[in-house]
Image (cartoon, rainbow, N blue to C red):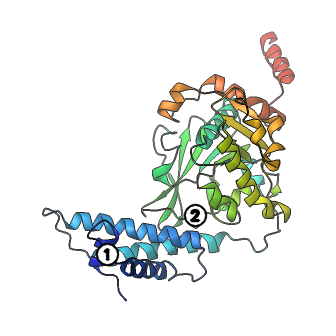
Amino acid sequence: MAVTSAQITARTGGPTSEPTDIRALEAELMDAARREWQHLPVADVDAAVDAGMLAASEAQAARAKPTDPSRADPGEIAQATAAETGAAAAAMQRRGLPTSASAPVDWSDFGTVIPVLAASPGSGASVLTALIADVLQLERQRVLIVDSADPSRSGLAAAARSNGPWLIRPHPRVHIRVSWRAQALLARLETDLPVVAPGMVPPPKFWQPPLRHLNATVVDLGHDPWRVAAHPLAGAGAWLRRGTPQPRPVLVVRPSRPALLHAEQVLGRLDPWVSSATMVPPAQLVVMGARRWPRGVAGAAGRRVNTLVPEAVFVPYDPDVAAAGITAAVTPARLRRAITPVLRRWGLLPDAAHRSLRSSSRRQS
């Protein structure tokens, strides 16, 4: 059964329809999403259906304007958009899935990979990504920032002063734009499709800029952590795979009992992949917006999160960052100081004694 304009109107806010119309429309878009690859994961099919619905809604609204000359059928637009979104997700996954899930990844071209995984949306992963990158680049480290989020929902959308001229094209509809954030490289996902399906995120090999050796790559995983944790072999989750040097994932939470509950659920979802040695578990818990645990919160940690609680790092609340988000300006020093000890412990920065000796030598010379 073909999708009709009447069905589109019913599904996207027009007159009330029978549920069978809704089911028929969604079935049509699901078939269109799987046209390129019948084994497309459910999460990507759902995203492709959403993309089709959104494109059709916009077409329906434009068609209603008397000044708009377009007479494109919203049903045809819905199917075409769902098919294109599904095809892009299929192409990215089929080019990025490893031949063996147990094979380690060679991360040497990216330096130390630091994937930043939020326990839930709004935890502050983008802020922490910028903090880590700023600490490293201010110490003259060569840093790549990877922003794998949907462009319309990215917390790093304003992290560069301007869009850079470098464009990597892993797919005709999916691009990676590389810009400068001070001395760090910022690689951000771009697409002209209305929705980024989880599988549309290019595999790590496409994010490497052809410029120079990197000391570290900081990755804002960006997507719903529940989806990322379900399939870390494709999409943004591929940055969690074990390899050499070993990635150091960071788990970000807010200082609340619900946040710890969400973190426990995400870690539980990752358990099978960790047990099979496919990925590495989070190496560090970071609590955003607090100097310490509020009373009664830390005790709510489940057994998985509880192993990370003793070494948890607290990044204090900053009203300017809370209001403006991450901009092209350097992040506040007091927030950077909170995360610096972790980077020193990981060997990414010289320790304090070595730094004092180096400063003393410079003064004497």
Residue drawn at (67%, 35%), measured in percent from left and top?
255
Which quarter of the figure has residue 276? bottom right
Q: Is residue 364 left or right of residue 170?
A: right
Number of marks drawn: 2
Q: In front of the other: label 2 or label 1?
A: 1
Q: Residues within 10 Å of mark 2 (few under 14, many from 20)?
A: many
Q: Is residue 48 visible?
A: yes
Q: Which mark is residue 17?
A: 1
Which quarter of the figure has residue 354? top right
C-alpha distance separating marks 2 and 1: 30 Å
Q: Which residue is mark 2?
A: 198
Q: Is residue 200 above or below residue 361?
A: below
Q: Residues within 10 Å of mark 1 (few under 14, many from 20)?
A: some
Closer to the camera, 167 or 72? 72
Disc 1 marks a residue whose amino acid type is: Ser
Residue drawn at (48%, 78%), measured in percent from left and top?
30
Closer to the camera, 175 or 238? 238
What SS does tag 1 mark?
loop
